[in-house]
Image (tube, coloured by chain):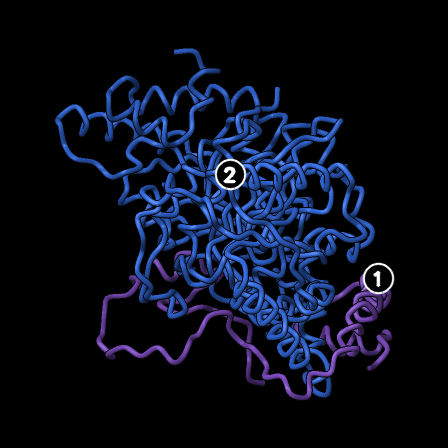
Chain colours: A purple, B blue
Amino acid sequence: MAVIDKKTIEHVALLARLELSEEEKELFVSQLGDILTYIEKLKELDTSKVEPMAYATATTNVFREDVPTPSLKLEEVLKNAPAKFQDFFKVPKVIE
Amino acid sequence: MRVAELISFTGYQLQEKLLSRELTAQEVVEGLFANIEEVEPIVRAYLLLDREGAVRKAQEVDARLKKGEKLGPLAGIPVAVKDNICTNGLRTTCASRILENFIPPYDAHVIERLKEADAIIIGKTNLDEFAMGSSTENSAFKLTRNPWDPKRIPGGSSGGSAAAVAAGTAFIALGSDTGGSVRQPAALCGVTGLKPTYGRVSRYGLVAFGSSLDQIGTITRDVRDSALLLQIIAGRDSRDSTSADVPLPDYLKELEKPVKGLRLGLPREYFMEGLNDEVRKAVEEAVKVYEGLGLSVKEISLPHTPYAVAVYYIIATAEASSNLARYDGVRYGHRTPGAQNIIEMYSCTRAEGFGREVKRRIMLGTYALSSGYYEAYYLKASKVRNLIRQDFSRAFETVDFILCPTSPTPAFKLGERLANPMEMYLCDIYTIPANLAGIPGISIPCGFTKENLPIGLQLMARHFEEAGLLKVARAYERETEWHLRRPV
């Protein structure tokens, strides 16, 4: 398994859309390295014949009729918006 | 009635006194707030107190009782709610800067149920940011202190709920448990914490952390109150498709039934190195109480226990990294001012809004799911998770309940484990397996250390066996008085 270096941290931070300070990058290089070293112990186990488990209880697909039901009012949905324009959430320019 | 006496009651006792009109709901609420004024500056369990709303609801309950109306089973009983459960019109922050001013436009399923039961919501309790932590020290807003020793942590992440119930600033409370966040703080604060089976309680309106692990639970002063509260919040809800369509027993009715002949298993892996001696002794004494009650006790093995923490920190962080992607500054929550483009807005909003532990977990989870590492980490962890679940299935073929400590140590000092995340993660070594397997677990008080710190006993059961779990916990409680002790 890979060693965590600063370049990896920067790549993962980009994927996670998380701006990190230089101090945080250095801290995470060492801390994530320690945690991943601990997690290495999973390699001791042979899991070639084990099925992965996604859910704790026997869950299969849950279906329901597609019936329209009332949802939140527009004004309630927009109430917590950091910025809005008419009935829309407003964000910085996306397309150049 | 004196405040000290009033606040000593359990929810069940309050229910009796309210129905017999020995007490009014307004007296209960006012007595509680009198104690909050005195104790809250020391314990600091709440992020928000809704005194006005509580008094209004109490007056409404009293008026309806006076008219002889039939009210819900929690009529007039104050409830504290962990601040990651959405409450319509009441700020819900998850103890995070990113949700500092978020006012939900809807109630979580459990809040709807509490309101239908005529309970009184008194406030929102402190937690580790987004429920990520074991000491409540990761809150962006305040440190909560253990009512038994204010220099120590209350446990976490539902530390505010546990501290409030222990300190008499709440009678009953809701928490959430992803890796032990109800049971561990309950153990460290000397109260009772129940994590139901995954799917027993709807997660609708619980802010998501690890969706295959999260479950809402109860924090109370005794097992009877756990049963009372679980009865209200449990059951199928179509808005959470993982909430189970499984018949709901009458928990209070099952509670006092006989326990003789039931089989307890002691997993040897839970009594190895790292377990504090005083905790071990207290749990061994509890075993003797059960033997005295006619239960059989034998040693069992859950061989994959040593891998549980490693599995958890892959699965929980992977799920968290995905769940927390929604905090982007677009629809609600904090947004960084002045960003020039959308990527910068996302990245800076999240950098400013999240605390260090949340960032650490998002990073770990994103890494574990990233291209080239998925199989080595997430898939591997999901397979070992299955082995852990199989350990439990095998054990439950020969025993009915599993008994062990809740936490390897009593409450530690504030700041003691902040520098080393791995040390903090190992706090949950005995509670994580139940979340991975989806089974129910309860922590009940079983003793005190020489320094007068509470010790918790954990019991675990098969899926959807909460009725039996509560009954066995209650049988111990009847024989002992640990749950009656209060901090001074």
Q: Give the position of the C terminus of chain B as an image quadrant.
A: top right
Residue at point 66%, 52% (across, down): B133
Farthest residue to the top: give it.
B2
Circle 1 marks a residue in which chain? A
In the image, B111 versus B260, the foreground residue is B260
SS for dot 2: loop
Q: How far apart are marks 1 and 2 (CA)?
A: 52 Å
Residue at point 43%, 64% (across, down): A84
Where is residue B301, by image quadrant?
A: bottom right
Residue at point 79%, 47% (across, down): B417
B300 above or below B258?
A: below
Q: Mark 1 points at which residue?
A: A27
Residue at point 66%, 69% (across, down): B347
Which x, y percent locates residue B86? Answer: 43, 52
Per the rendering, the mark at residue B268 is none
Q: Mark 2 points at which residue?
A: B293
Q: Which amino acid does label 1 sit on?
A: Leu
Which x, y percent locates residue B351? Answer: 68, 62
Where is residue B340, by image quadrant?
A: bottom right
Can residue B340 be seen here? The reply is no
Q: Which amino acid does label 2 sit on?
A: Leu
Q: Give the position of the N terminus of chain B as an image quadrant.
A: top left
In the image, B393 versus B61, the foreground residue is B393
